[in-house]
Image (cartoon, helix red, strand yellow):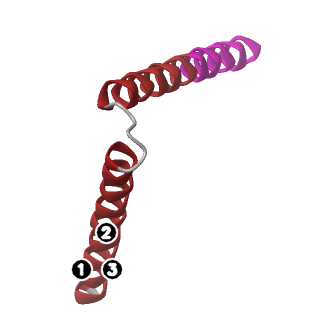
């Protein structure tokens, strides 16, 4: 059983590494072929990360409010 779990973990890890390599190659192609400035890509990445952070913060606040409301009903 332990060998099976180890094998699955290695498969998942290698799949993740392959996906990250493919993503890096695609971004490198965008910079080289389409002449997209790296600064623009970095700015877009930061905007996406900030947007995700805002969404996660809102979800955490809503979750906390739901927890408080459930405790209040009991």
Q: Marks 1 and 3: CB-CB under 8 Å?
A: yes
Q: Residue at x 38, y 31 (%)?
A: 41
Residue 29 position, x and y percent, is 35, 53
Q: Nearer the viewer, residue 31 or 41?
A: 31
Inter-mark Cα distance, 1 to 3:
5 Å
Magenta stretch, main secondary structure, is helix
SS for dot 1: helix
Q: Residue at x 31, y 53 (%)?
A: 24
Residue 63 position, x and y percent, is 61, 22
Q: Quadrant of residue 64?
A: top right
Please state the extent of the stretch shown in magenta in the rendering: 58-74
**Residue for badge 3:** 8
Residue 26 position, x and y percent, is 39, 55
**Label of residue 18 in the image:** 2
Q: Residue at x 71, y 20 (%)?
A: 70
**Residue for badge 1:** 6
């Amino acid at each position: 059983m332990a060998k099976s779990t180890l094998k699955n973990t290695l498969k998942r890890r290698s799949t993740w590494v392959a996906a990250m390599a493919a993503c890096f190659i695609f971004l490198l192609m965008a910079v080289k072929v389409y002449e997209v400035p790296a600064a623009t890509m970095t700015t877009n990445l930061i905007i996406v990360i900030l947007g995700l952070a805002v969404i996660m913060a809102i979800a955490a606040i809503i979750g906390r409010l739901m927890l408080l409301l459930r405790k209040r009903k009991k």
